[in-house]
Image (cartoon, rainbow, N blue to C red):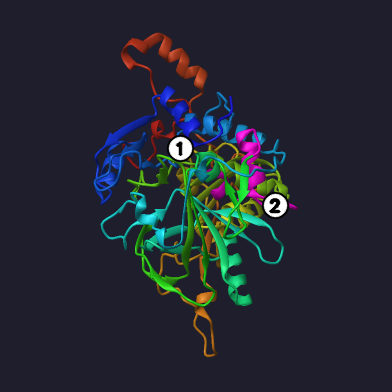
Amino acid sequence: MAYKDLRGWLEKMDEMNELVRINGAHWNLEAGAVTALAGNRMVLFDEFPGYPPGYRVLASSSRDKKERFFVTANWSTEAEGLALTRAWLDRLREFKPVPPKWVDSGPIKENIIRGDDVDVLRFPVPIRHEKEAGRYIGTGHTVILKDPDTGRINLGTYRMQVHDGKTLGIHASEGKDGRIILDRYKELGKPCPIVAMVGIDPATFFASIAHCVHLGDVTELDFLGWLKGQPEEIFAGEFTGLPILANAEIAIEGEIPPDKLRMEGPFAEWVGYCQPREFPFVNVKTIYHRNDPILTVALGEGSRPPGKAGLRSDFRTAAMIWDQMERAGVRGIKGVASNSRRLIVVSIKNMYAGQSRQAGLIASQCHAGAYGNAWVIVVDEDIDPNNTTDVLWAVLMRTEPKRALQVLEYCWASHLIIQDPSYVQKADYAMRPEKATYMSRVIIDACKPLEWAPSWHEDVHIKPELKVQALKKWGDILGSGPTPGDRSVVGGGGGAV
């Protein structure tokens, strides 16, 4: 049965024993430490010092286990591993837009704060990490903007720092839809209307970060309705006129001046602490919230594994990349893995000269794969892209480095993800460095070249049926034995394994 809002989703999480409740934690660092200790469980905080009971924080609802995502997406499968990615890809291809439904009111209108009474610190906004610039209200949220030229509505997640009770910083990275819209308002010399939904259900968050390709008039709101199995109810904000989700927990309306900046950061991102830089800011005009509101945030995450997702592939991102590659004409894809965005692995049936290089190039540049990516590895169909040991084996044993590596320059990047601070374009003529941030990509073609004879460096392995036969005879001594296909049990001439 579909859920309507975050509270309905949390009821299902309670039934699944996925929720931990903590009362009395402090918003200053302590809540983050508690969340880190909770592991993969979500934490619902209440009774913060200095705040009335009922002003709650849901931490790390974005850290999805697949069972939780099945509830979020009103979908499920028994598939595992690569088959799970394939199943979600098939589900994505069933997408049909479910437009939102305009309404006059909703639970989020239970409290409306305007004018001098506006103060975003009426909510227990946490300080997440000790070196951050302050309290961040936008980490598990969605921002709603409108393209001034086309009228298209965009949902995106762009972090938001609390400068004071009436002012929020906003960090929209280069190339993101939100940044393009902000830049356009700046060109026009007009303030940019904005709504920040800072208390949302996980489906809204997923729609906000899913890197959907813009096709026609379809928006993230249409994707959200399809994901939840029912139209999302929205009403027009009284200050901006932008759509506000009627059943969400907290919404903030305001505008972004076109010609003013404030220092934002440092902030603990998935790549490590980001350095402070000047960014636009939001002048808050109106706040909407439900009684006993729930602020949704990301807490307790570090930049090293397990970090935001460690080096474990996210089947949802992998399926998006797979879909966009096939739509671009890449043939023979057998699997895709996306590891913390930095590494993409593509497995293909290599059928013609140049196919593996084509796959690597398009994986590195398609919309879902391009942002944050640094490495793409293309392997043959006998390699599971989710098995990092097998992928590394293919790189080590099936490549000649000079032939296998291709470096691409001037690719999509942002200051958020760039690793080399000296990687700034220099020239003898006038430049606008704030307009251009690039980074390189590496494509590793770890497929066996088609001109190799099948007998050249043919794999050495023991047939699974022979292992089964041996286990029948000596299983009581050997135990369960190695996993079929485990290359670590095959010794080499170089010494012990």
Find residue 446 and report its horizontal and vertical position in percent: 55, 49
Identify which residue, 119 or 458, lies in the foreground: 119
Which residue is painted at 58% across and 24% down in the image?
A: 1
Circles 1 and 2, Cβ within 8 Å, touching? The answer is no
Identify which residue, 418 or 136, lies in the foreground: 136
Which residue is painted at 53% across and 61% down in the image?
A: 441
Left/right placement of residue 477 relative to residue 440 reads left
Is residue 379 visible in this depiction of the protein? no
Left/right placement of residue 445 relative to residue 388 reads right
Q: Earlier in the sequence, mark 1 or mark 2?
A: 1
Q: Is residue 209 magenta?
A: yes
Q: Residue furthest right?
A: 216
Q: Is residue 88 magenta?
A: no
- Asked if residue 185 is positioned above or below residue 57 in the image, the reply reads below
Residue at the disc numbered 1 = 64
Find residue 281 and report its horizontal and vertical position in percent: 46, 67
Is residue 490 visible in this depiction of the protein? yes
Residue type at mark 1: give it.
Asp
- Asked if residue 127 is positioned above or below residue 348 in the image, the reply reads below
Q: Secondary structure at mark 1?
A: loop
Find residue 340 and report its horizontal and vertical position in percent: 46, 49
Q: Which residues are magenta?
A: 206-231
Residues under labels 1 and 2: Cα distance?
39 Å
Residue at the disc numbered 2 = 353
- Asked if residue 402 is positioned above or below residue 128 in the image, the reply reads below
How packed mark 2 is, by other alpha carbons closer than 10 Å (few <14, some 14-19, many 20 or more), is few
How packed mark 1 is, by other alpha carbons closer than 10 Å (few <14, some 14-19, many 20 or more), is some
Name the quarter where the C terminus is drawn: top left
Q: Secondary structure at mark 2?
A: loop
Which residue is painted at 34% across and 16% down in the image?
A: 479
Find residue 136 and report its horizontal and vertical position in percent: 37, 56
